[in-house]
Amino acid sequence: MEMTDIQKQILILTQEGIPITSSPYHDISQQLGMTEEDVVEQITLMKERGIIRRFGASIGHRDIGITANAMCVWNVPDENVEDVGRIMATIDDVTHCYARPRHPGWPYNIFTMVHSYSRDDCLAIAEEISKLTGIDDYKVMFSEKEFKKIGIRL
Amino acid sequence: MIQLDETDKKLLDLVQLDFPLDAHPFRILANKIGISEEEVIKRMQRLREEGAVRRIGPIINSKETGRVGTLVALKAPEEKIEHIAELINSYPEVSHNYLRPGDYNVWFTLSAPSRERLQEILEELKQEIQCPMMDLPTTQLFKIGVKFKIK
């Protein structure tokens, strides 16, 4: 990991959220003895280098009505994982898509997270994905309870 | 539930993926959608206070920072679920933990600074929980939480 000390400081000072003001980097720049432009430049660099995946708003999706989330798991022939994964990733309602190993009694090797306004929406999206990819061995698992949810922090 | 008008939706759409990297980001957003900077700030403050926006900041790439992660599923007996969930949550390395229907009913994600630490946590949990567990590390990443489609 090639992150400079100053970059690390910037991450620590912004990770709980920048203030919503005309000059959100003012306080941080003062604390670090830099200009606001320098702070923005370092953030841009970290984004380019992939240290920051995205810089922007995290949405309280439940609070705006996107209350249903389903983990859909798919049994995809190994040789098609690459193609099918790519297709699934293009669907807007699919927020996450990963390949994962199979286990004894667990044949599912692609995982997609679907977020939408209702469980029916999620089921319809899963059906749409199934039609689009031809994968018909799948399960839709809704979350019945959220025990914990936090982002990664330094 | 939070009421959103068309301008709020436009703003939410923009700030998720294309938040301007600039010393005055709200001014740029204002120019993009044709309202004043003051109005953007007022609206964004309301959206944050009411929970539509949780925070504006960096989403750190766990891989780039040297962290390793996995998804774990386990078959927890009904009567032990709450206790097991609490035990899992007690690890700061656990970021998400959900109850889902099915044989495998507790699903959580783990992220640790090293493979060794990850294995150590998995071993500790195996010892303490004593129920079937699947370790499901990502073998290929196709998409990761970019954006919610706001209707």
Image: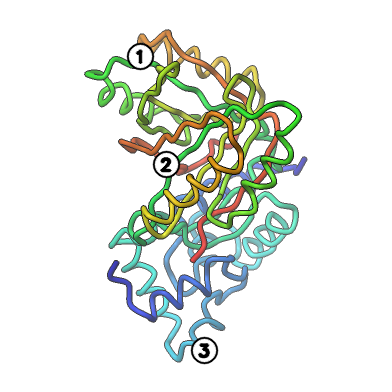
- Residue topped by disc 1: A133
Residue depicted at 29% across the width and 15% down the height: A77
Q: Position of residue B15 (x, y in %)?
A: 52, 54
Q: Nearer the viewer, mark 2 or mark 3?
A: 2
Output the chain of dot 1: A
Q: Position of residue B54 (x, y in %)?
A: 64, 55
Work out whether B107 lies above or below B103.
Answer: below
Q: Nearer the viewer, residue B93 or A111?
A: B93
Q: Nearer the viewer, residue A68 or A30?
A: A68
**Amino acid type of the residue tagged 2 in the rendering:** Ile
Q: Residue furthest left?
A: A79
B18 relative position to A99: left or right: right
Work out whether B51 lies above or below A2.
Answer: above
Residue depicted at 38% across the width and 55% down the height: B116
Q: Quadrant of residue A108?
A: top left
Q: Position of residue A50 (x, y in %)?
A: 32, 58
**CA–CA distance in space, label 3 to label 1:** 53 Å
- Residue topped by disc 3: A30
Query: Callout 3 environment at 10 Å: few (<14), some (14 to 19), or many (20+)?
Result: few
Q: Nearer the viewer, mark 3 or mark 1?
A: 1
Element type where label 1 sits in the image:
helix
- Residue topped by disc 2: B144
